[in-house]
Image (tube, helix red, strand yellow):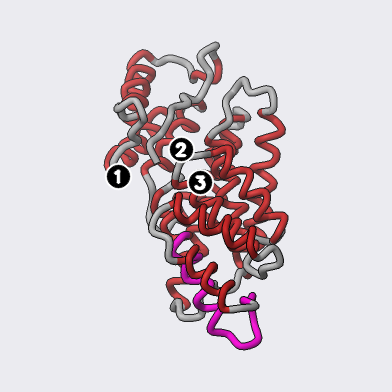
C-alpha cells in the first residue's frame, strides 16, 4: 500500500492516545499509571516490531483496556509496514471486532485484499466481495468522521478525508479490474485520482490497465506516461511495471490489435509492487 497513506495514518494514530489522555470525560482512559505507561510504550515505539511487542504487552496485561481497538489497529498497521499480509489481515479483523465502525481499518483492508488476490484463487470471489463491502462501508463513514486530533486544522482534516475516500475508490477499481469489469474499474480509478490530494503513480498505472482492456490505447498511454512521470511502478524484481506496460501499449496501438479483453490474453499483469 502507499507509503504516504500509511505514514499519514500512523501519524494520526500515534497522536490519538495523547489527545485522549488529555480529555477529562471523553474518549478512552487508562485506569492506572501502569496502564498509561504501557499505552505510551506503544505510542513511542520507533519501529514495527517493537510496536507490535508493546501492543501485545498492553493487551495481555490489561485485558479490559479501553485502548484495545487502538492497540490492535496499531498492530495491523505495523504488520502492513512489514509487508506481512496474513498478520495484517488477522489484526485488522480483530480491530474491526473491537471497533466495527473503524473506517481506517476498513480502507486499509479493502486495499490490501485485492492487492494480494490472484486471478485463479479458489476464494477470489469471496475476497473481492469482502474488499468491496469494506470500501463501501468506509465511504459511508468517512464524510462524517470526526477528527482524531482536535488540533488538526479543518483544511488539513478535509484533505485527510479526501485521501481516505480516494483510497476507497482505488480499492473498488482494483476489485473491478480483477472481475474484468474494465469500465467500472475506469470509473472508480478516475474518481480516486480526482479526489487524491497527492496523486500516485500506481493509480495511473491501474487506470492505464483498465483503459488498455477496453482498447482505449491513446488514453492508456497518457495515463501510463503520468505513472512514469510520478516515479513509475517499481517491482520486487527490479523492473518498472509502468515502463513494461507502455511498451505493450505501443505495440498494441502500432499493430491495431484488438483489446486484450477480446482475446485469450485478457488478464491484468499481477506483479509484486514495492510499497
Mark 1 or 2, which is nearer the eye? 1
Residue 198: give x, y in percent of width and height: 38, 56
Residue 18: give x, y in percent of width and height: 50, 76
Question: In this view of the protein, can residue 152 be seen by the observer?
Answer: yes
Q: Is residue 112 above or below residue 167?
A: above
Task: Say which residue appears at 55% left-offset and 58% top-offset.
Answer: 55
Mark 1 or 3, which is nearer the eye? 3
Task: Say which residue appears at 52% left-offset and 78% top-offset.
Answer: 19
Q: Secondary structure at mark 1?
A: loop
Earlier-in-chain disc, 1 versus 3: 3
Residue 174: give x, y in percent of width and height: 55, 38
Mark 2: give few (<14), some (14-19) or many (20+) Cα within 10 Å: many
Does residue 24 belong to the magenta stretch? yes
User: What range is drawn magenta here?
Assistant: 10-30
Residue tagged 3: 79
In depth, the one of 22 and 182 nearer the eye is: 22
Label placed on residue 212: none
Q: Is residue 69 left or right of residue 162?
A: right
Place residue 188 in its image quadrant.
top right
In depth, the one of 251 and 117 nearer the eye is: 117
Place residue 45 in its image quadrant.
bottom left
Mark 2 or 3, which is nearer the eye? 3
Q: Secondary structure at mark 2?
A: helix
Please say if the residues under marks 1 and 3 sit with CB atoms less than 8 Å apart.
no
Residue tagged 2: 207
Mark 1: give few (<14), some (14-19) or many (20+) Cα within 10 Å: some
Mark 2 to mark 3 CA distance (whole Å) = 28 Å
Label placed on residue 230: 1
Amino acid at each position: 500500500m502507499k507509503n504516504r497513506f500509511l505514514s499519514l495514518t500512523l501519524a494520526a494514530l500515534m497522536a490519538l492516545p495523547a489527545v485522549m489522555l488529555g480529555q477529562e470525560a471523553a474518549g478512552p482512559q487508562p485506569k492506572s499509571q501502569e496502564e498509561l505507561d504501557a499505552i505510551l510504550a506503544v505510542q513511542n515505539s520507533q519501529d514495527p516490531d517493537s510496536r507490535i511487542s508493546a501492543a501485545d504487552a498492553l493487551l495481555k496485561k490489561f485485558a479490559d483496556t479501553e485502548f484495545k481497538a487502538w492497540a490492535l489497529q496499531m498492530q495491523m498497521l505495523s504488520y502492513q509496514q512489514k509487508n506481512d499480509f496474513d498478520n495484517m489481515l488477522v489484526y485488522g479483523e480483530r480491530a474491526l471486532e473491537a471497533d466495527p465502525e473503524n473506517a481506517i481499518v476498513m480502507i486499509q483492508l479493502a486495499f490490501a485484499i485485492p492487492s494480494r488476490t490472484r486471478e485463479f484463487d479458489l476464494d477470489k470471489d469471496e475476497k473481492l466481495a469482502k474488499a468491496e463491502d469494506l470500501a463501501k462501508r468506509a465511504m459511508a463513514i468517512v464524510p462524517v468522521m470526526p477528527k482524531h486530533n482536535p488540533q488538526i486544522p479543518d483544511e488539513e482534516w478535509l484533505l485527510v478525508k479526501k485521501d481516505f475516500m480516494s483510497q476507497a475508490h482505488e480499492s473498488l477499481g482494483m476489485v473491478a479490474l480483477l472481475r474484468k469489469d474494465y469500465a467500472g474499474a475506469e470509473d472508480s480509478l478516475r474518481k480516486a485520482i480526482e479526489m487524491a490530494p497527492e496523486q500516485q503513480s500506481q493509480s495511473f498505472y491501474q487506470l492505464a490497465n483498465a483503459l488498455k482492456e477496453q482498447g482505449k490505447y491513446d488514453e492508456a498511454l497518457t495515463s501510463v506516461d503520468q505513472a512514469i512521470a510520478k516515479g513509475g511502478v517499481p517491482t520486487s524484481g527490479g523492473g518498472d511495471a509502468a515502463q513494461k506496460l507502455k511498451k505493450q501499449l505501443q505495440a498494441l496501438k502500432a499493430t491495431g490489435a484488438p483489446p486484450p479483453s477480446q482475446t485469450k490474453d485478457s488478464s491484468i499483469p499481477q506483479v509484486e509492487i514495492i510499497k
